[in-house]
Amino acid sequence: MNKHTLFIALIALLASVFATSCPAQTAPEPGQSTVSIWVKNNSLFPRKVILKVREVGKPAAYGSYIVVYLPYGSKKIELQVGATLERMKDTDLPVMMDGKGNDITGKILVTAQATDQGKTFNLWD
């Protein structure tokens, strides 16, 4: 392969790994507090992870993140106090995209509390 082609492929790969994901959740209502937590890949291997956020008081509403974590990498996530953050399986993604995400539950990583501000939560046990 050409050196330029390899360089462009490497740049495209790095851009996709380091790209920020846009949360699919709505802004909190006035009077509701939010917390910032860190979610960490505590593995030696890079991982693609699907995270689902269930909103407070709206059990039918959820948002999702699809994040590629580098080894021991972390990502900051804003959650409403009381919202739950779940780690989903890759096989759950088509179900969530069909709008049936409430029918499945992943591994609950955290239910956000005001005391969780700035804490780090590991993806893997």
Image (cartoon, rainbow, N blue to C red):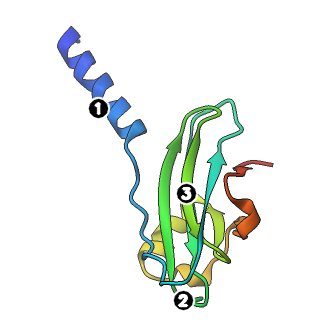
* Foreground label between 3 and 1: 3
- Residue 2 appears in the picture as rendered: no
Instruction: Report the label total.
Output: 3
* Foreground label between 3 and 2: 3
Q: Is residue 2 left or right of residue 102?
A: left
SS class, disc 3: strand
Residue drawn 67% across and 75% down? 105
Q: Amino acid at mark 2?
A: Ala
Q: Residue 50: image x %, image y %?
A: 54, 58
- Residue 30 appears in the picture as rendered: yes
On the image, which quarter does residue 33 sit in?
bottom right
SS class, disc 2: loop
The residue pinned by badge 2 equals 60
Q: CA distance from mark 3 to mark 2?
A: 21 Å
Residue drawn 23% across and 23% down? 8
Q: Amino acid at mark 1?
A: Ala
Q: Is residue 116 left or right of residue 104?
A: right
Residue drawn 18% across and 14% down? 4
Residue 41 vs 95, above or below: the answer is: above
The residue pinned by badge 3 equals 77
On the image, which quarter does residue 15 sit in?
top left
In this view, the residue in front, 16 or 76, is 76
Residue 72 vs 30, above or below: the answer is: above
Q: Residue 116: image x %, image y %?
A: 73, 61
The residue pinned by badge 1 equals 12
Extreme residue toward the top, this view:
3
- The tag earlier along the polypeptide, 3 or 1, is 1
Q: Amino acid at mark 3?
A: Ile
SS class, disc 1: helix
